Amino acid sequence: MKLTKGASEATQKYMVDGIRYVCENFKERAPGTHSERAAQKYLKGELEQWADKVEMEDFTLHPGAFMGWIPVAGVIGIISVIFYWLTYQHIVNNSVLAIIATILVLLSLACLVIEFLMYREFVDFLFPKKTSRNVMARRAPKGEVKRRIIFGGHTDAANEWTYSLHGGLKSLAPVMGGSIGGLIAISIFDVVWLVYSLVSNGTYESKFWLVAGIIQLILVPFFIAICFFINWKVIVDGANDNLTADFIAMGVLKEMADNDIRFENTEVCALLAGSEEAGLRGSVAYAKAHKDDLSDVETIFIAMDTMREIEQLQIYTQGCTGTQKNSNAVAEVIYEAGVNCGIEMKETDIYPGAIDAEGFSRYGLLASGFCGVNHDPKTYYHTRLDTPDNMSEECINLSLDICIEAAKLYDEKGGLNAFRAEGAKRFKKGHNN
């Protein structure tokens, strides 16, 4: 018996009902919370119905670091402006304030680049440590394992983005653009200011210094606004982002089990990562811990995130704001599976974000992904509107069909070699694995 395109109505219903159940019974699943861990334990039990082996592993992290530096940076920007004007007005007549402001602003800029754009740890040790967990389910082939395909999403949910709820991109763009641009401008100016204060006698007679000070004052509202970028009191349901991907990955194993399907030599897996919203910490932790045992045979990872809008289904060959490349060949698997299911997905452009595939790619593992999220964020993205009532069953079902088809193609063609050449041609921006 072979897997056929189009999941059963039972699996389709299970995914939607399952997402609703998790949202209702495991609320506030922020990274490293009891609710997140409890949800993972529940999903582990569900996966045990269809998998031969289900592993649940805890890992530690500092979830506040990924976004927690943002309001601090906003305050630092304001302090820097105040320090400058204290010096410009000769209320303080030495270079101490320039030194302090420059150091703090440059540290904030480093947080922007390392934590937010590159998804790397930088100031994590300054934030409280918590425990999250990953769940990995494996369905063995009939014979020897010669290759492995993993489908994955993440179980945690985000804190609400204030400006995503109130205006979407119309609010997000000016606040983020003004604050990020302002931080860069302040960083450059503070370095100039520091050098000048160290080599001069502290006179600011040139109009340059007045104009620079006025420009800094104009940036203050953006620094104030970014302090309220995250609503720390609200944790969203995360129905779309990203329980959709979790249940699609689980749906692959359910379909195989319900139809008594096992490939000859391909192991099929589902990875439900924790703490993606804290900067990919779950997928990074899993890839780091299992790099060697995942390299026993050819292994590919297909990550998904926010499977909400069919017209926005795209393939992600790069992430972490373009600083991490994913596998072209794995992208080709996704592309061919999509075509066979009636949709031709394009490669996404560089965007300020990441998916769990980059956690694997960072450690040299073969990964790529596809998502159904609009890069012009809709008001449900990272807000209280991301509920089970705001899902697209059509997009979830199609995404499941694509995953099932990808597993079938990967097995039938005997691994990734059959996809490498075409992937290298089609996805020129991605890394050529």
Image (cartoon, rainbow, N blue to C red):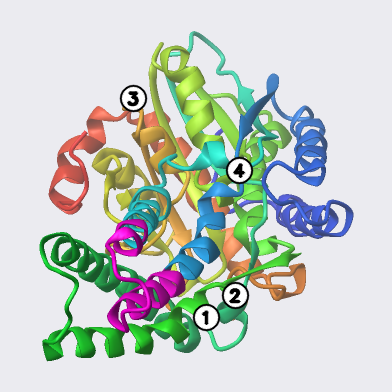
Does 356 sit above or below residue 150? below
Element on which disc 2 rests: loop
Label 2, residues with CA under 10 Å away: few <14, some 14-19, many ≥20:
some
Which mark's residue is nearer the viewer, 1 or 3?
A: 1
For marks 2 and 4 on the same chain, the one whose residue lies earlier in the sequence: 4
Whether the magenta-drawn stretch holds residue 200 is answered as: no
Frontmost residue, 282 versus 270: 282
Splitting the image into 4 quarters, where does residue 255 fall?
Answer: top right
Q: Main secondary structure of the magenta part?
A: helix
Q: Are marks 1 and 4 in contact (CB under 8 Å)?
A: no
Label ID, residue 127:
4
Residue 90 colored in magenta in the image: yes
Q: Say which amino acid is labelled 4.
A: Phe
Q: Which residue is mark 1?
A: 225
Pinpoint residue 296: horizontal percent, then vertical percent.
Answer: 41, 11
- Determine if residue 5 is in view: no
4 vs 3, front mark: 4
Q: Is residue 92 visible?
A: yes
Name the residue at 57% across, 30% down.
Answer: 269
The local crowd at label 4, few if under 14, some if 14 to 19, many if 20 or more residues have their Cα within 10 Å, is: some
Q: Which residues are magenta?
A: 77-100
Q: Gap in Å between the C-alphas at discs 4 and 3?
A: 46 Å
Q: Which residue is mark 3?
A: 414
Residue 190: give x, y in percent of width and height: 25, 66
Image-based side of 339 in relation to 65, left or right: left
Question: As drawn, is 286 to the left or to the right of 339?
Answer: right
Mark seen at residue 228: 2
